[in-house]
Amino acid sequence: MIPQSESLTVEFKSDRKRLSDTELVEALVCLANTEGGELWLGVEDDGQATGLHAEHMVLTGLAGMVAARSSPALQVTVEALKVGGVPVAKINVPKAQGEVATQAGVYVRRRIKHDGTPECVPMLPHERISRASSFGLVDVSAQPVAGSTLADFDPLERERLRQAVQQYGGDRVLLELDDEAMDGALGFTQRLADGTRVPTLTGLLLIGRESVLQQRVATHELAFQVLAQQAVRFNEFRRFPLLKALDWLETNFRPYNPEQELQVGLFRVPVPLVDMAAFREAVANALIHRDYHRMGAVHVRLEDDALVISNPGGLVDGVTLANLLVTEPRPRNRALADAMKRIGVVERSGRGVDTIYRGMLKFGRPAPDYGRTDLHNVVLSLPTVPADVAFRRMVVDAERNRNAELPIDSLIALAALREFKRLSADALAKHIQRDAASAKRTLEALTEAGLVEAHGNTRGRSYTLTAAVYSVVSDKAAYTRQVGFGSIQHEQMLLSYIRQHGQIKRAEVMELCRLTEGQAKHLLKRMSDAKQIVMRRHGNLTAYVESQ
């Protein structure tokens, strides 16, 4: 029952000499200020259970003591267990929504050392603010920057901002405002009690002078790197204001982003290495949502097989890799995000992730990969594998027929069917991060559009791309492999398998005939009713053999 070793969320504490209440509360606060977890009292660092001290044999009141000696009160649950006949206590610690201190005012957090073992370290003031911002409790970007004045704003960056509103189709009302009114509308300044205005972090990041940013926002830095076959072709670091930074990154990236043209009817459709809308949205998101209390640059790195964009600061609370597509927007720096939306740089609906996914999937490339994201960094990888031109032509034709872009769920469904060949609604639900009912509606809509074909009954229904789509993508044989096996062919395959191996299980039927569980059940029942096969039970296992 005891975990094999300590980790970021597991702590062992020996109780042979009676662990003091102060040490125990500190260790629990340490877990709460990170990811929560469990503390095993009466267990040595090597995982050996040595038991509770006599004074801890009765655990009643332990949870109350922890709550009384922490602020705000930390609510833990305590379980009395026996491991190998030795009494131990498992204390479950929730992740704190903010930060928790001991009664003595000690703030600590948990981290992993270079050797992979955990330790508790003090939470410094900037780390406490950083944690609060990740929970949406503090908006650092709306706070004044100490020592900064209105003279720190750059007139050239103001003009760049006005041009950006026109270029990106932002809120044109901003163009009618004078400088002071625009500063107020975009949250660039905050008015103090004496009536004076001082720049906020958002103001300095967007229209501040570069020299001021270097001095007063030391954490702001960005890098563009081009790495080709282990050689560094481009490697520059800058501290530009954000709008200038985006222009600089886009200008330097374009020479490395070749395009080919696709002829669709009378139109020529560009097929770039990386979709520029996805590039701009991904880079802007990294600059907007980074943690400005952490040192480290926003990296935009073009590698041999992918464009990788990373920023300091993990995902904010409530956002995970499993709900990235569907969760409500939760910006870490709300004032900065709102300003960039009004300027038009990022998606105003807050669904910029959709733009990034669309920019990859519409060209038949793999979906964006956030798999390397951790507690400290968000890492986005955009594969730069060759585009599937035939798939892109199919998407263009489909969107022209409906006179609108395909919904992002439909693009994900088409890409998944292209990769996995056959899917059920339940399987697609995991890809679009929605429930099975939503996935079924997406598949049925694609069926009505003539892009997807349904197979089987309602309960065990599965879907493939249509013959017409396979024809467009020049893979006609794949369609036949997927749907060409009729019921008689399935029966012959099943009987041949039994003759070779003596019996067959339902899971083997699913794999052999590429059927869903419901379809496999239906096939086995039909053959049993026809006396072609007989069911045999061996304990909890069920198999089918040929009738004699």
Image (tube, rainbow, N blue to C red):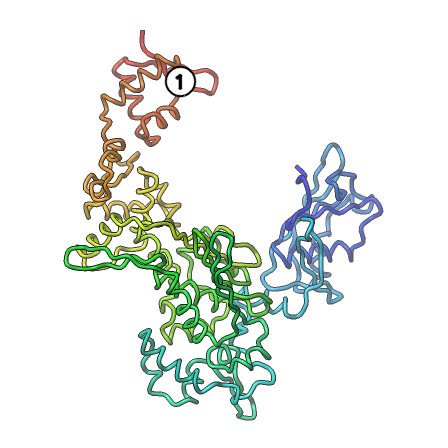
Position of 279 with respect to 238 (left or right) is: left
Where is 255 relative to 391, above or below?
below
In the image, is residue 29 above or below residue 184?
A: above
Q: Is residue 132 left or right of residue 432?
A: right
Q: Residue 434 in the image: x percent, y percent?
A: 37, 50
| Location of residue 185 in the rendering, given as x and y in whole percent from the top left corner | 41, 82
> Could you tell me which residue is drawn at 19 percent across and 53 percent down?
397
85 relative position to 175: left or right? right
Q: Quadrant of residue 159?
A: bottom left
Q: Quadrant of the N terminus?
A: top right
Amino acid under disc 1: Ala
Label 1: which secondary element: strand
Residue 423, can we see it?
A: yes
Q: Which residue is mark 1?
A: 543
Residue 525 x/y as whole percent: 30, 21
Name above or below for residue 156 compared with residue 217. below
Residue 388: percent from the left, percent from the top? 29, 48
Q: Quadrant of residue 338?
A: bottom left
* Residue at horizontal 70 percent and vertical 39 percent from the top: 81
Looking at the image, residue 476 sits to the left or right of residue 53; the answer is: left
